[in-house]
Image (cartoon, grey):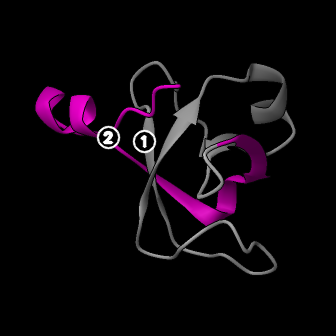
Amino acid sequence: MKKNLSESQFALCIENRDCDDLEKRKIYQILPDEEAAQEGYLRVIDESREDYLYPESYFILVKLPRKAKDALVVTN
């Protein structure tokens, strides 16, 4: 999944094995983390509303229209 995270800030969850805070078929916000990406992980804001590392194989990066991104961005 070597894709520039500056192009896509959201991902569709396709697997949640052993991850209680992820739901399949749900779109999650992804935070930039180059070090994690090099190790095969994505930094995801999950159902706990906190960011954690998950295997990149659990997600498909998606490109969304600006209006959809604005509606999905998690703010503190």
Badge 1: how crowded within 10 Å, few (<14), some, or many (20+)? many
Which SS class for mark 2?
helix
Q: Do the residues labelled 1 and 2 touch (CB within 8 Å)?
A: yes
- Which residue sits at x=77%, y=44%? 52
- Residue 69 sits inside the magenta stretch: yes
Residue 11 vs residue 63: left or right? right
x then y, percent, for residue 28: 47, 50
**Residue under pointer 2:** 72
- 68 or 47, which lies in front? 47
x then y, percent, for residue 48: 66, 54
Residue bounds of the magenta highlight: 50-76
x then y, percent, for residue 44: 63, 44
- Which residue sits at x=16%, y=26%? 66
Mark 1 to mark 2: distance in Å?
A: 9 Å
**Residue under pointer 1:** 10
Mark 1 or 2, nearer chain start: 1
Residue 47 vs residue 17: left or right? left
Relative to 56, say whether 29 is above or below: above
